[in-house]
Amino acid sequence: MEIDEIKVIEIMNDAMIELLKDQNKNYEKNLKIKQYLKDEAIFFKINKTNAYKILENVGVKQEQLEIVYKKLTSPNVFYDLLHRGKIEANDENLVVKYKTYDKELFKKSN
């Protein structure tokens, strides 16, 4: 079973919100992050710097940022989101994208 990285980030963010609440600290950033994470394709739509800021705010350790970011923006995740209609291949707003092929190219010709 493959781990859904975005779900892990959502759970970490929810835990961080609770922790910050318990410590009477400001958790406004994490509430905004919760809204951003509703879009499963968010990490394909923002630059690496902003992605790292989100990951840091949910509690990803500095030395794990690159690893987690690569998992969240991997080709497998991209193609899964594409297949499920969560992103469009020709979306100009995508910061991270991978090559897609025209389905017509693969149809049998008579």
Image (spheres, rainbow, N blue to C red):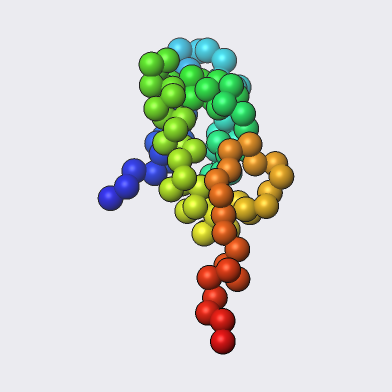
Quadrant in the picture for residue 22? top left
Q: Look at the picture and state if 35 lies above or below 56.
A: below
Looking at the picture, how far across and down is residue 74, in whole percent?
45, 40
Looking at the picture, how far across and down is residue 55, in whole percent?
49, 25
Looking at the picture, how far across and down is residue 18, in whole percent?
45, 24
**Residue 101 vs residue 1, the one in the foreground:** 101
Looking at the picture, how far across and down is residue 102, in whole percent?
60, 63
Quadrant where the C terminus sits is bottom right
Q: Residue at x 70, y 41 (%)?
A: 93
**Residue 10 vs residue 21, the one in the foreground:** 10
Q: Residue at x 60, y 24 (%)?
A: 50
Q: Residue at x 63, y 54 (%)?
A: 88
Q: Residue at x 46, y 30 (%)?
A: 69
**Residue positioned most to the left:** 1
**Residue positioned most to the right:** 92
**Residue 68 vs residue 11, the one in the foreground:** 68
Q: Look at the picture and state if 72 lies above or below 66.
A: below
